[in-house]
Amino acid sequence: MSEELFFNGIDATTGEYLIPPVAPETMAAAISGQPRDPAEAQALKDWWSKYADTNKEKIVDMTAKEGTDYLDLSSAGWGVIFPHNVDPTIVKALRPLLDWRKSQAGKRYHEYTGSEGYRFKPNEKYETKDEWLVRHGAGPGPVDPDIVPYYMLLVGDPEQIPYNFQIQLDVQHAVGRIFFDKPEDYWNYANSVVSAEKKKLSLGRTAAFFGVANHDDVATNMSAEQLVKPLAASFAKEAGWKIGKMAAEKATKSDLSNVLGGKDTPALLFAASHGMGFPNGDALQLNNQGALLCQDWPGPKEWRKPIGKDFYFAADDLADNANVFGLVAFFFACYGAGTPKLDEFSKQAFKRRGEIAPKNFIAKLPQRLLSHPRGGALAVIGHVERAWGYSFTWGKAGPQLAVFESAIKRLFDGWPVGYAFEYFNGRYAELASELAYTLGEMEYDLKVAPTDLAGMWTATNDARNYVVLGDPFVKLMA
């Protein structure tokens, strides 16, 4: 048997891993028999093959048709998709942002609402990405902003507009999402974006890299040493930027509060840790799932009991007087952006967990950051499932940071969040295409090492679950 695979995510009620370590052979046996969506696999294969044929050296220039200026909304376009039955008070609350984007995009601005909005019936069939695009005259391939804008903001609960629609649309477009519990939260976010951009807010060229490394914990030690530390080092000499590295002893809850609303809040915060997980229906799940576990936790061997609030940073730890106005945050943590109702990993690989939440939902910490009454963060990037080490390391090849480095470099250079994170979409399309091909050939006796298959499947599912919360056209205010 090969060395066991370790997975991110801590169960707050037991102090143990959400999924126990598993041998690659066990995982590979389950993966090879998993059902696949042929339409989705073919669409990604087509997208990637066109990209690969036309873009040997550049990774994301096939996003929109040639000549598109991604910094100019009058060229790239900006659209907003509401559920077909959206509450009019939400649209009204967002009007400051909508009017501002319309003034920038002109004829390439579009509001999709009512019959043009996203169609769904609870507990019935949801519209796919292809079905929605076809309704609006668009198909596969580079985005034509004259038909459907390149930058797209989804406004709605993932029960209304599912995560899968967001993820698949994001392969072609630059997509973000917002959803809040109250209309005034939408106004807070809209007002924050407009105020920051119109008044040309400047937070200074500051970035903080926060890396938890808990004792006897393989997952956080790997992310601290192979992701956070080298990322901070690679940008340490970035011209004009002040880079803060907060590893191990500087990764406590108190330290996090200093860079997440406190006196040292930067323009960009990158944090890697375990995201908290709770059993389906637990009283704390909806409010605390995805909260960031800090260095205060003694580790999985020493602490085999419920994990208390003293060890993790949740939405209610962000005080009303916190200052997060203009922040862009990236959380590498399980459920850091949200949680699906169905477990996309173990429902196939382990055949036993089924539903992991009573519904699909957005994590409360990014919601609180984006809608903060003193001025909200502009965007939060994170996972809507578990986060995995395959995002930044690849077997014997070792650390693979090009996607992270490239996306962050684009942010530093003033590119919009949605465009910067096309690197992640390109990686997802490449991995998904390769996995679909491999699983298909295995039906004809192709031999694949269990470790390779487990890695490829896990990496694909990991790559697909990065999402942007917030307007995809926002930029670092530095």
Image: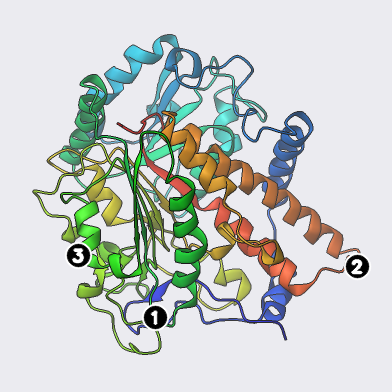
Q: Is residue 229 above or below residue 378?
A: below
Q: Is residue 336 above or below residue 408?
A: below
Q: Are marks 2 and 1 in contact (CB under 8 Å)?
A: no
Q: Amino acid at mark 2?
A: Asp
Q: Secondary structure at mark 2?
A: loop
**Dot 1 crowding, Cα within 10 Å, few <14, some 14–19, many 20+:** some
Q: Calculate the distance from the C-alpha at mark 2 to the C-alpha at mark 3.
A: 54 Å
Per the image, the residue denoted by label 2 is 445
Q: Calculate the distance from the C-alpha at mark 2 to the C-alpha at mark 1.
A: 43 Å
Q: Calculate the distance from the C-alpha at mark 1 to the C-alpha at mark 3.
A: 18 Å
Of the image marks 2 and 3, the number of the one nearer the N terminus? 3
Please state, as top left, top right, bottom left or bottom right, where the N terminus lies in the image: bottom right
Q: Secondary structure at mark 3?
A: helix
Q: Amino acid at mark 3?
A: Ser
Of the image marks 1 and 3, the number of the one nearer the N terminus? 1
Per the image, the residue denoted by label 1 is 215
| Residue situated in front as seen by the camera: 443 or 4 | 4
Q: Secondary structure at mark 1?
A: loop
